[in-house]
Image (spheres, helix red, strand yellow):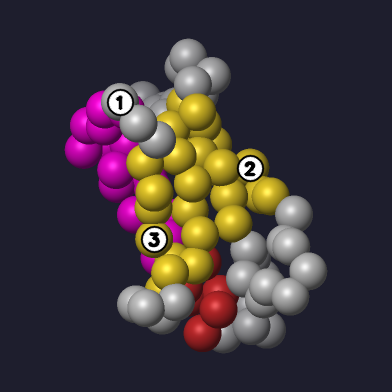
Amino acid sequence: MVAVRSLVRFDPTPIPAGQKTGAWEVWSTYSATYLGRVRWYAQWRRYAFWPDVDTLFDRACLDEISTFIAGQMAARAHPSAER
């Protein structure tokens, strides 16, 4: 089995005063390019991904972002679980 290198990394950003949810900057691990941000979208009551201008994503990259968001939603639903 071949180990697959992660395509993105998620850097947490400080939670501003008055906000309850975290946010993460999303960066390419290959080119150190800023790709966008994952943050809470109140209208949908869930985390969402805001891509940066002129960014391009393949399926593998989007799968990693989607998996990260699913994990954050699961942690939010079960706060006692490890993050």
Vertical comparison of 51 with 78: above or below: above
Mark 1 and mark 2: Cα distance apart in space: 20 Å
Query: Which one is in front in this view, the residue at disc 1 or the one at disc 2?
Result: 1
Q: For residue 70: magenta?
A: yes
Image marks 1 and 2: residues in contact by CB distance under 8 Å: no
The region drawn magenta spans 55-71
Using the rendered view, name the quadrant where residue 79 is placed.
bottom right
Whole-angstrom CA distance, mark 3 to mark 1, is 18 Å
Is 60 situated above or below 39? above
Look at the image and tell me whether residue 6 can be seen.
no
The answer to which of marks 1 and 2 sits earlier in the sequence is 2
Gap between marks 2 and 3 measured at Cα? 15 Å
In the picture of the structure, the residue carrying the numbered disc 2 is 11
Asked whether, in this view, residue 10 is left or right of residue 13, the answer is: left
The residue labelled by disc 3 is 48
- Name the residue located 62 percent from the left edge and 71 percent from the top edge: 21
User: Which label lies toward us, 2 or 3?
Assistant: 3
**First reached walking from the N terminus: tag 3 or tag 1:** 3
Quarter holding the C terminus is bottom right
Crowd tier of the residue under label 3, counting other residues whose Cα lies within 10 Å: few below 14, some 14–19, many 20 or above = some
Where is residue 67? Give x, y as percent.
38, 56
Pick the residue in front: 5 or 2: 5
Residue 50 rendering spot, x and y as whole percentages: 39, 49
- Magenta stretch contains residue 58: yes
Residue 65 or residue 52, whichever sits in front: 52
Amino acid type at mark 3: Ala
Q: Label 2, secondary structure: give it.
A: strand
| Quadrant the N terminus occupies | top left
Q: Which residue lies furthest to the right in this view?
A: 17
